[in-house]
Amino acid sequence: MLSRLNLAALTDEELQALVGQEQAVALLPEISAARLVERAVPGPGVSALLTAEPLPERPWGASPEESRALAALHADFLAAQATAHGTFYLPTVNEVRHLRSYTLEPDTAAALRWSETPESVGAGWPFVQLLTWLRDRASGLACVLTTSAPHPLSPSPGAEVDVHRHPGAGVADLLTLHRQYVLRHGRGQKLAPDGDWLRPWQALHALNLGAWERRGLLLA
C-alpha cells in the first residue's frame, strides 16, 4: 500500500531537511496557504513495506571524493568485524536511496547510505546509520538509532525511537557512542539467526509509519 507524504503537515525544519533549503523556500507560499485552510500538499510516496533491490557491485559514488569516502567507510566496517550483506537500492521519501547493509554481532544493524544523484539533498557525502532494538521497553523506547547524517531525519522518527546524530563521525567512534546509548536502556535484542538484515529496518519503518499517521503526515 502506497501513501503520500503531506508536506503541509511537516514542520518547517522537516520540510527543509527533506527537500533542501532552496526548494523549501520555493514551496513556502503554497505550504503556508495550505496550512491556513487545512489543505494537504501531496509529497513523495511512502510505502508500507521496504523493498530493497540488490545491485551488482561496481565503483560507487557520484564523485571521486565520494567514492573514496565510501571505500574508506566500508573498510572501517570490516575492521569493526561487521558482516556485509551487499549493496541495494532502497526507495525512501528522500533521494538518499543507495544503501550498503551490514550487521554487527550481537544486536546491531548498520547501513552506509548515499545518493548517486549529485544534485539531490544530502548527496556528496555518505553517512552511517546504526540501529539496535531494545529487549526491555520499560523506558518507553523501542530502539536506538545513531547516525552520522549531516541533516536531521525527515519526517522525524516516532517518540519510541531514541535518535542520536553525530554529523561526520567515523564508524568506530559512532559504534562506541551507539553502544553507550543502548546500555542506558539495558540490552539490545539479538539479531535474527537467519541473517535477514532488512527486518530491523522494516520494523523501524513500521514504527515510524504509525507515528506519522497519528501526526496526519500520510495521505491515502
Image (tube, rainbow, N blue to C red):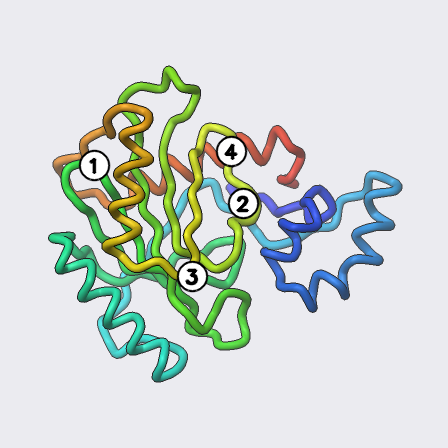
Cα separation between marks 4 and 3: 21 Å
Q: Residue type at mark 4?
A: Gly
Q: Which residue is mark 3?
A: 97
- Location of residue 149 by image quarter: bottom left
* Horizontal relation, residue 66 to residue 75: left or right: right
Q: Which residue is mark 4?
A: 158
Q: Residue at x 24, y 72 (%)?
A: 71
Cα separation between marks 2 and 4: 19 Å
- Look at the numbered discs 2 and 4 and tell me whether their residues touch, using CB distance below 8 Å: no
Image location of residue 93, percent across then percent down: 53, 53
* Element class at badge 4: loop
Q: Closer to the observer: label 2 or label 4?
A: 4
Image location of residue 206, percent across then percent down: 44, 35
* Horizontal relation, residue 86 to residue 10: left or right: left
Sort mark 3 into few (<14), some (14-19) or many (20+) by Cα contacts within 10 Å.
Answer: some
Q: Residue type at mark 2?
A: Leu
Q: Which mark is residue 2?
A: 2
Q: Residue type at mark 1?
A: Asp
Q: Residue at x 28, y 60 (%)?
A: 100
Q: Which residue is mark 1?
A: 107
* Horizontal relation, residue 23 to residue 59: left or right: right
* Element class at badge 1: loop
Sort mark 1 into few (<14), some (14-19) or many (20+) by Cα contacts within 10 Å.
Answer: some
* Element class at badge 3: loop
